[in-house]
Image (spheres, helix red, strand yellow):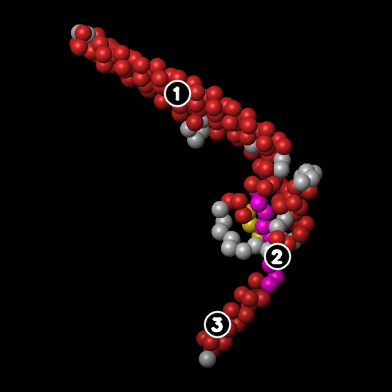
């Protein structure tokens, strides 16, 4: 009997506490898509990425050309010349892979550019969300863009436009 009473009290407290919490959600993709500086930063990152990808592909094409030439001339080369050519091809291929890593690795130039261009904008959005949560006494604000599975959301709890207003951006 005491166990049943204790379980009922715990369940009642859980339900009571659940009603006391305020929830809201935002869509950061929607918010970021309405910020002109973010769009400009994304275009700039795309430009850098395309340039660097082209440079890597051109360098890799040169390595492939060297390898094809080597394959065609291999029978005519001495053992010493073959070894030198193979070493040159391996060295050039390693240099291209190092170049690719310097651009596209997790700590590469593209990541650093993204940090430089996009992170300040994301920080502004986060600060606006934080201010909205504080002012509205929200306990939890979910982000529907981050892959959180929400089967239903009531539009009246969507505070994305309020975040944009907080940032001084009209939609």
User: In the figure, 22 relative to 122: above or below?
Assistant: below
Q: Secondary structure at mark 1?
A: helix
Mark 2 vs 3, N-terminal side: 3
Q: Residue at x 69, y 67 (%)?
A: 21
Whole-percent x, y for residue 118 in the image: 64, 37
Q: CA distance from mark 2 to mark 3?
A: 25 Å
Whole-percent x, y for residue 59 in the image: 43, 19
Residue 21 got which mark? none
Image-based side of 11 in relation to 99, left or right: right
Q: Residue at x 70, y 60 (%)?
A: 155
Q: Secondary structure at mark 2?
A: loop
Q: Secondary structure at mark 3?
A: helix
Q: Residue at x 50, y 23 (%)?
A: 54
Q: Quadrant of residue 170?
A: top right
**Region of the chain picked out in magenta, as a range:** 19-28
Observer-nearest of 28 and 120: 28
Whole-percent x, y for residue 53 in the image: 50, 26
Rate crowding at label 1 as few (under 14), some (14 to 19) or many (20 or more) other CA atoms within 10 Å.
Answer: some
Rate crowding at label 3 as few (under 14), some (14 to 19) or many (20 or more) other CA atoms within 10 Å.
Answer: few
Mark 3, residue position: 7
User: In the figure, 101 relative to 64: above or below?
Assistant: below
Mark 2, residue position: 22
Q: CA distance from mark 2 to mark 1?
A: 52 Å
User: In the figure, 51 relative to 138: above or below?
Assistant: above
Mark 1 vs 3, N-terminal side: 3
Q: Quadrant of residue 11?
A: bottom right
Q: Are marks 2 and 1 in contact (CB under 8 Å)?
A: no
Q: CA distance from mark 1 to mark 3?
A: 65 Å
Q: Are marks 2 and 3 in contact (CB under 8 Å)?
A: no
Can residue 139 be seen in this snapshot?
Answer: no
Mark 1, residue position: 57
């Amino acid at each position: 009997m005491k166990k049943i009473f204790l379980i009922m009290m715990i369940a009642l407290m859980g339900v009571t506490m659940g009603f006391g919490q305020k929830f809201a959600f935002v869509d950061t993709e929607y918010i970021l898509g309405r910020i002109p500086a973010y769009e400009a930063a994304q275009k700039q990152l795309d430009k850098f990425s395309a340039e660097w990808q082209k440079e890597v592909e051109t360098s890799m094409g040169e390595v492939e050309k060297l390898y094809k030439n080597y394959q065609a001339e291999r029978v005519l080369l001495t053992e010493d010349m073959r070894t030198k050519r193979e070493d040159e091809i391996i060295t050039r291929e390693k240099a291209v892979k190092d170049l690719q890593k310097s651009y596209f690795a997790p700590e590469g130039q593209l990541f650093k550019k993204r940090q430089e261009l996009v992170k300040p904008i994301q920080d502004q959005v986060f600060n606006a969300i934080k201010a909205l949560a504080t002012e509205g006494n929200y306990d939890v604000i979910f982000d529907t863009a981050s892959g959180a599975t929400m089967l239903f959301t009531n539009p009246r709890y969507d505070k994305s436009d309020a975040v944009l207003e907080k940032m001084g951006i009209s939609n």
